Amino acid sequence: VIADLMRRFQKPPQIYLLDGGYVSHENIESLTQAGIEPFAPVRQPRNKDVDPFEPQPGDPQAVREWRQRMKSDRGKDIYRDRASSAERVNAELRKMGLQQLAVRGLGKVTSAILLTVLAFNTVRAISLLA
């Protein structure tokens, strides 16, 4: 994750919002070591008596800090804002038909996605200017 960010932007972001499917101790630690503050949902434990925001046995320091960060009002607010921006775009693109592509190959897939994104941005620009 970090190598890709550095390649694309030449410097790491200050914060990074992870989707729930990418939450792992390894990702939290590597982002923290790079000086990036990760924000990601805390998984609910199987045992309902365990508070998911409290440090668990064996948690590395970065994970302990992340759990406390996500328990705070700031952590909840920052992650809530992610849903209003990123998830909305995903939902709109799915409505436009970007659920399953009928093409194969990197070039064709890239073209299909770029055309869909171009259409989305055009519709969005028109709605903002109206």
Image (cartoon, rainbow, N blue to C red):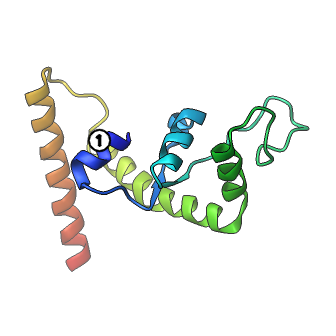
Residue at position x 34%, y 51% in the image:
92
Residue at position x 48%, y 46% in the image:
31
Name the spot of residue 125 as percent of width and height, x first: 20, 69
Nearer the observer, 38 or 83: 38
Which residue in the structure is indicated by mark 1? 4
Is residue 106 in view from this perspective? yes
Amino acid at the residue labelled 1 = Asp
Name the spot of residue 39 as percent of width and height, x first: 56, 53
Nearer the observer, 49 or 94: 49
Nearer the observer, 62 or 68: 62
Name the spot of residue 121 as percent of width and height, x first: 20, 60
Which quarter of the image is occupied by the C terminus?
bottom left
Side (left or right) of 96 relative to 70: left
Side (left or right) of 24 relative to 87: right
Name the spot of residue 37 as percent of width and height, x first: 52, 56
Side (left or right) of 128 relative to 54: left
Query: Element type at marker 1?
Result: helix
Which quarter of the image is occupied by the N terminus?
top left
Mark 1: few/some/many CA within 10 Å (<14, 14-19, 20+): few
Query: Furthest-bottom residue in view?
Result: 130
Is residue 130 in view from this perspective? no
- Name above or below for residue 115 compared with residue 81: above
Query: Furthest-top residue in view?
Result: 104
- Name above or below for residue 73 compared with residue 98: below
